[in-house]
Image: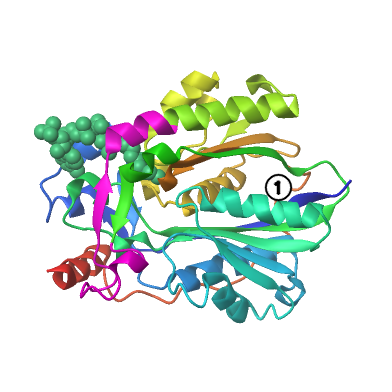
Amino acid sequence: MTYAAITGWGKCLPPNVLTNADLATFLDTNDEWITSRTGISERRISHVSLEEMAYVSSMRALAAAGLDPADVELIVVGTCSFDDQVPNQASGLQVRLGAKRAASYDVNTACTSFLYALSTANALIRTGVVRNAVVVGGELISAFMDWHNRGVCVLFGDGCAAVVLEATDKVEGLLGEKLGCDSDARNTLVVEGMGGRYCNKGLPYGQTSWTFEGPEIFKRAVLGMSGACADVLAAQGYKVDDVDVVIPHQANLRIMDAVAKRVGAPADRMFVNVQKYGNMSAATVAVALVEAIEEGRVQPGSLLLLPAFGAGLTWCAHLIRWGQRTTPLGTTDIELPPSDRTALEIVQGYLKKAG
Ligand SMILES: CC(C)(COP(=O)(O)OP(=O)(O)OC[C@H]1O[C@@H](n2cnc3c(N)ncnc32)[C@H](O)[C@@H]1OP(=O)(O)O)[C@@H](O)C(=O)NCCC(=O)NCCS
């Protein structure tokens, strides 16, 4: 039987840091409220396009896998904050990589997009359609943020990461997943301004207003993620004690704690980096996976459980058996271009344009 091993991984975080104190310079908020309700201390704000972050992440992941971009057969980008909707994000990345042989498409399930993208690429490898894939989770959410809304903008940040999948006959990579959508609650998270229904109505594209029912999303996210974890573990014949690392969607520390409690996973088995980046939507699980490897939390043969939720309200949990290699085969010196503005200056620019 064919499996899809994860053979390469790379992340790209924009260098500009927006702290809770920075947010308090233009919003009625403070560090104590944000850290106690969410666990977030700072987030990154990108000075470059999503394509640029996806390019750097993918080149790092390909170097780690030792795979030539010219040999890539599939590119899947998970995101909801496209640079362009037409043509798609993945084809832009394909041009940058020079991956002429690849098929390229995007997946949008909001914050779960990286994991849903992983599901599709895994399935195409396991059914023999392609032999390898680059899967990206990335967002430039700052460009679509309502920076006047303190209930939302303090939660999110920009970032990107990528993995390389390659066909193998060893039992590793994505063993199984549980996917679902609590669509009765789709109106609890709506970004008005992002989509065709707002076009040609005199509104500048990108100027948004967020409907965001935080406590309701919180409740449903905990139920969706913990239910998906229980289902995927049972379907694959594992117990939570078999899991070495839980790498959840990083939206809110309190949500992660509640999921760990319901699933029965000890807190020290959970990987957390929300304090550094906030909720990077599709990039959160991807970046957390890369950092869990870099920090030695993922060991040869580790069993990983990755639960997530996003607007829709989509939810899922993925079970991954890591292979024997936890170090990159190679590295690249490709970097983002330097920024001539601070994170706060970039956000002030958005505030000025939104009026
Ligand atoms: C958004 C969230 C952090 C709010 O936490 P909460 O404990 O539920 O807080 P509440 O929404 O009840 O707000 C409490 C108060 O804080 C205020 N508040 C909201 N944002 C604030 C901010 N940035 N700074 C200070 N006060 C703030 C509210 O106005 C409210 O004030 P009031 O009681 O006077 O009306 C939490 O509900 C959450 O994380 N939900 C999940 C959302 C999510 O992750 N979505 C992503 C989907 S992928």
Residue 222 in which image quadrant: top left
Answer with the quadrant where ligand 1 appears in the image.
top left
Where is residue 325 shown, x and y percent of the image?
A: 76, 48
Q: Is residue 137 left or right of residue 45?
A: right
Q: Is residue 164 left or right of residue 43?
A: right
Where is residue 204 shown, x and y percent of the image?
A: 23, 74
Q: Alpha-carbon neighbours of circle 1 within 10 Å: few (<14), some, or many (≥20)? A: some
- Say what amino acid the circle numbered 1 marks: Thr
Residue 177 magenta = no
**Can you say whether 304 is above or below 135 in the image?**
above
At 32% across and 42% down in the image, what residue appears? 188
Where is residue 283 shown, x and y percent of the image?
A: 48, 54
Where is residue 280 shown, x and y percent of the image?
A: 41, 52
At 27% across and 72% down in the image, what residue appears? 341
Secondary structure beneath disc 1? loop
Quadrant placement of the C terminus: bottom left
Read off the residue under disc 1: 326
Seen from the viewer's position, the closer of residues 31 and 137 is: 137
Numbered range of the magenta stretch:
193-221
